[in-house]
Image (cartoon, rainbow, N blue to C red):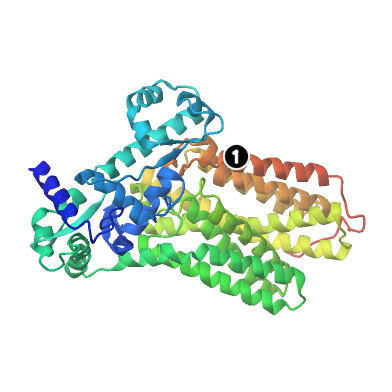
Amino acid sequence: MKKILLLSLISMMSIFSSTLMAETYFCKKDLEKLPILQGGRVKPLFVHASEAIKNLTGSTNVKEYGPVEAYCLLSLNGMGLVSDLKLEARIDHVDLMNFLNLPADKHTITYDELLSREESIKNEARMVKDNASYKKAIGKLYDNMFLYKEIKSGENWLLANTVDNHIEWQPLIVYLTEDKVVAQKALTPEDPFLPVLLRTKTEFDKTLGNTKYELELYYAKAGLASWALMLTILAFATLVLFKNFNIALGLASISVVVQLVLIALRVIISGRAPITNMYETVLFSGFGSLTMALILGHFKKEKLFVFMGLGYNVCTLMMLNFANGMLTATISPLVPVLRDNFWLSTHVTMVILSYGALALSWILANSVLFRRKWGSIHKKEELVIADVIYTTLKWGTTMLAAGVILGGVWADYSWGRFWGWDPKETWSLIVLCTYMAILHGRHTSWIKTDRFITVTAGAFMSVMMAWFGVNYILATGLHSYGFSEGGAIFLGSFFLVQIVVLVVTGKSKNPDVDVNVNVKV
């Protein structure tokens, strides 16, 4: 029966080939708003198509086709319709290139060729034991091959079919039936397929009365992270270049609003706190640090807080916009332990905000080290900066302590124990103890001003280990839902650069600084 249906569709497409574009059939941008079921939730076709095509090729566009057109054209193969579109997989791992017999100057191979070698790739994946990076690379390739096969079969595209005022999700090849197309042919003989597909949106909206999924389309196309980055860079530049502080303050405030809108949209779309993956923690950390910097700068009447906030915000927004291999903006379903919004919104939020506050001290401490070595800084100015750093450390350490305690309470609630020396728990405690020691040493004058700046700059490496290292390098423990790939090189580079800065600037002191000066508590 299925073959008869497919043959009927093919024949009808040939009848109308004179008026339809032979290359794209009904695959047009009009389909991007269609509600589909993927990843356990309803989302616009544009969002899923963009994620799928980018997963497969590394880019959201394929030749002259946008993500929706490319995704649709691949799906036509499942109905027996001809589509010449072929996707190529990007291969970067050296061992995987050797296994696939790719020349050194060629890093791509078509998925059709990969599928012809599916059994050998599957066997290779089973045989790899010791080489963790190679195992991950070949495992990811195999997952992409499965996704490609599912799209080509037409079974990856789940459309809403309304039956007796009830929604049933059906693959494209099941939903697009002959009777629907024939009935529509009487109304729009030049193209009966597109209206049938668009009708699924109308019926879905009418049945559920919910068009929230459309908001995700606007969110995906708005590029708010890029706008926020541009505004933050402009604010940072005006802060450094111009004496008029109000210009930088205005731009920084607009950037905060843009980031707040970005976070709010993710909350509305996902229905949860925006801190459930690495992308969101980086986003929230940068937003929180800039917000805290503006608030502290206002009450303390100190411009340096804004300098720190903008500097760190630029770093986080650069990661969101360009570290696509490490961070993904995909909104995915939560594992059961994270579905308690109360604990998620308190424990994780408090910890991420503490990282943002501690990052402010890291930015300013490194700027002092650079000025000591390659510029000039006056005794009085360095003491003021040390006092500002001390203030941010107090805020950050207090929030981190609260976050660790709340995490213990959540662990007791979820896992039946307050503390278990899980890698994430252990490193959070290491960070807390590190900064408590720095605060105590500074308060008692045990850590002098010159040493205080250096120690503060180096201490942030413990934060990066707790934040990124456990997820990207250790990847063990009960916090496995936060593990990701692709960040080991980034983290290693961060550690290397920071250690080099500390070594190179280690002997650089400001001879004018009074090392026994007391700071305000």
Q: Position of residue 294 (x, y in %)?
A: 63, 71
In the image, 181: left or right of 254? Answer: left
Secondary structure beneath disc 1?
Answer: helix
Count numbered badges in the picture: 1
Residue that appears at 52% across and 58% down: 283
Left or right of residue 521, residue 418 in this image: left
Camera-side residue of 388 and 323: 323
The answer to which image quadrant residue 449 occupies is bottom right
Q: Residues within 10 Å of mark 1 (few under 14, many from 20)?
A: few
Instruction: From the top left corner, tell me how far across and down residue 510 is, in percent.
Output: 89, 55
State the residue position of label 1: 489
Q: Residue at x 22, y 68 (%)?
A: 205
Estimate the x, y position of residue 187 in percent, counting from the top left: 12, 69
* Point 74% across, 79% down: residue: 244
Q: Is 77 above or below relative to 340?
A: above
Is 229 situated left or right of 454 in this image? left
Where, by quadrant of the figure, is residue 186 drawn? bottom left
Q: Residue furthest front?
A: 18
Can residue 463 be spotted in the picture?
yes
**Is residue 398 visible to us here?**
no
Q: Is residue 302 above or below residue 462?
A: below
Q: Quadrant of the N terminus?
A: top left
Please state the horizontal and vertical placement of residue 72, each as a whole percent of the image: 29, 52
Disc 1 marks which amino acid? Ile
The residue sitting at 43% across, 64% down in the picture is 221
Quadrant of the frame with the C terminus: bottom right
Horizontal side of residue 491 vs 89, given as left or right: right
Residue sitting nearer the eye, 92 or 206: 92
Furthest residue to the right?
Answer: 511
